[in-house]
Amino acid sequence: MHDFRSVFLDDEASELVLLDQTLLPNELRYLRLSRLDDIWEAIRTLRVRGAPAIGIAAAYGLYLAVKNGKPSSIDDVTRMVREAKRKLETSRPTAVNLFWALQRMEQRASQNLQHDGSAGANASDAVANILRELRKEADLIRDEDAMMCRKIGEHGLSLLKPGMGILTHCNAGALATSELGTALAPLYLGNERGYGFKVFADETRPLLQGARLTAWELSRSGIDVTVICDNMAATVMKRRLVQAVLVGCDRVAANGDAANKIGTLGVAILAKHYGIPFYVLGPTSTIDWACPSGAHIAIEERNPEEVTTAWYSKRMVPEGVPTLNPAFDVTDASLISAIITEKGIARPPLSESLGAFRN
Ligand code: MRU
């Protein structure tokens, strides 16, 4: 469906290949990274971004850290897995998919280390075996993501009607995942089936994921997309130009509170005011069952220069005036009409309905 991929492995070259999202929409360039520090930097600076894509990049990053570290013993592998996991976990704090993917990789390693240890395999066979297993687990995380996106798309589309106006915030599309995206998946499937959606993409200050990325990927697929400044969402709703809001999520608490790109909360409040359904779409890997409510979600605070200077030829905030730059906010469960996952649609009360998707 798309002629680009946000993240993939070139195993022969032992490199992670990333579409550098900081350069879009002006330049389509792939980065080839083999060093853990560079993969960490790519996640940190949003060259690869979006909760599922971060998880996939981290999984391959851990695999490559071990492979390229050329371990000669099981102890080496154990140490490398631990160090890579620790390092990658510090790249970004909010999207739970990062921690979830790294946890899966560590678990796969430790299961096989135990097995090879008790089977008495020689060191080089055991190392080769564990590398194969790590590669398989990272591939699985990517393939499961592609499958989940498609299912999320089908469930999401069941709530929409042809010709609808749709508002979205940030980018929860193909760039943010392995394939179709989450919030944008119903739009791609609907487009194939002639739904004729009219999409409004919030530009999404300060890093412009809506203007740069959502508009790029939707327009590339021939979907009707109009970019609006974030402060125009109320007017678009008041004019009855949109009949549903679709957004992604970075971490959903067990009670249904959902962290997503800064500005999502405001859109949800507006949608409630105008009686427009507000849908959060994401894989169940984005639900953090250990997190009871949004109050417990760590919110990333980013460099003030993203607010004061990025995109401008001159600084646009007086010197010495402080800025706030939280990268995410938490939308209260009470503002969410439904959470759409690969396992189905959870409706309020979300603290009860989400439970059906556990395990
Ligand atoms: O800071 P970003 O660009 O990584 O934030 C991305 C979002 O907020 C997305 O909506 C979310 O990760 C879901 S992506 C399918």
Image (cartoon, grey):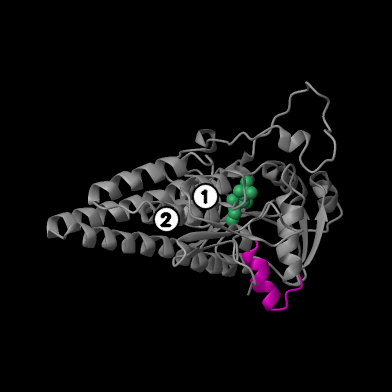
Q: Secondary structure at mark 1?
A: helix
Res. 57 in view: yes
Q: Which residue is mark 1?
A: 39
The image quadrant of residue 24 is bottom right
Mark 1 packing: few (<14 Cα in 10 Å), some, or many (20+)? many
Judge whether residue 314 is colored magenta. Answer: no
Residue at 70 percent across and 51 percent down: it is: 209
Q: Which residues are magenta?
A: 183-197
Query: Residue 75's spot in the image, x, y percent?
Result: 24, 46
Q: Which quadrant of the view contains residue 178?
A: bottom right
Seen at 83% across and 25% down, the residue is 318
User: Left or right: where does residue 149 sit relative to residue 199?
Assistant: left
The kind of residue tagged 1 is: Ile
For the C terminus, give its image quadrant: bottom left
From the Cβ of disc 1, is ligand 1 less than 8 Å away? no
Residue topped by disc 2:
64
x and y percentages locating residue 102 in the rendered image: 41, 49
Looking at the image, the residue that sits furthest to the bottom is 193
